[in-house]
Image (spheres, rainbow, N blue to C red):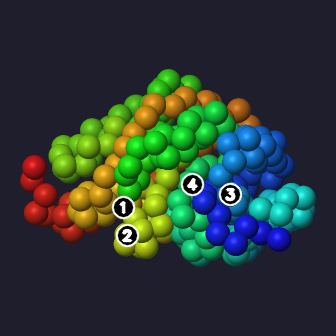
Amino acid sequence: MKNAHPRLSIILLCYKAEEHFVSYATEIINAFKKVHPPFEIILVANYDAHDTADKTPAIARRFAQQYKNCCVVARAKEGGMGWDLRSGLEVARGEKMMFLDGDGQTPVEDMVRLWNFSEEKIADIWALYRTPRRDGTIRKLMTLIFNTTMRILFPRLRVRDINAKPKILTRRAYETIQPKNNDWFIDAEILLAAMHRHFTIRQIPGAFYANTWRASFVNLRVVLEFMANIVKARIQYWWVIK
């Protein structure tokens, strides 16, 4: 039987990860068993309807059968990363919700450290910022440009690394913000909405490893999406000047 009211929902984004997420998810479950918050883990294994070769949904369902506190979201995709995240948040039952990618780039001990930090320091959102980073010069440069642009346009948004994961939201923050973005801008959407509502955001450093088994999904199309979303956000929050 699943926990009736888990303290924490861990949302693991497993798009096209296939068997690569299995050892990472196992490590997460074992680590949080030792910490003892009543928790659930949600494997988001959404798939492209035309991609019949993707085994991720089947692997996720088999994995979830081994753990009473594990469930799977596997739907034909109707959007990008933001849509995947929202589909996981929608079924989460925890008082707090932690979300991150399932490719193993964040050390599990940093996830636990962020959880402990969230229990010690009152806030609406808690987040890691990536340092040191080991995912390559190009990705670091792209992140620097994006974060610098956001700081210039939204000086009240005092977040060091906007797209870094994991993040933890309180249920109140999630239900107030109700993110709508379907693509890679969803982290920024959540943080900008938090800024607008004067929510408290606390950050701590965490390591970020290279992905050794697949290339990044961040490409020119994603960069153009970011640019379009930044323009829309600047118009939406036109009154934010300091």
Q: CA distance from mark 4 to mark 3?
A: 16 Å
Q: Is residue 195 left or right of residue 82?
A: left
Give 190 or 111, whichever is nearer the viewer: 111
Q: CA distance from mark 1 to mark 2?
A: 9 Å
Residue type highlighted by circle 3:
Pro
Q: Is residue 135 left or right of residue 49?
A: left
For the residues bearing labels 4 and 3, Cβ distance under 8 angstroms:
no
User: Would you say residue 149 is visible in this rendering?
Assistant: no
Which of the marked residues, 1 or 2, is nearer the chain's N terminus?
2
Label 4 environment density (alpha carbons within 10 Å; few <14, some 14–19, many ≥20): many
Q: CA distance from mark 3 to mark 2?
A: 25 Å
SS label for mark 3: loop
User: Would you say residue 199 is visible in this rendering?
Assistant: yes
Q: Which residue is denoted by mark 4 in the rendering?
A: 99
Residue 177, image x and y in percent?
A: 37, 69
Q: Which residue is denoted by mark 2 in the rendering?
A: 177
Which of the marked residues, 4 or 3, is nearer the chain's N terminus?
3
Residue type highlighted by circle 1:
Glu
Q: Which residue is denoted by mark 3 in the rendering?
A: 38
Which of the marked residues, 3 or 2, is nearer the chain's N terminus?
3
Q: Quadrant of residue 46?
A: bottom right
Which of the marked residues, 2 or 4, is nearer the chain's N terminus?
4
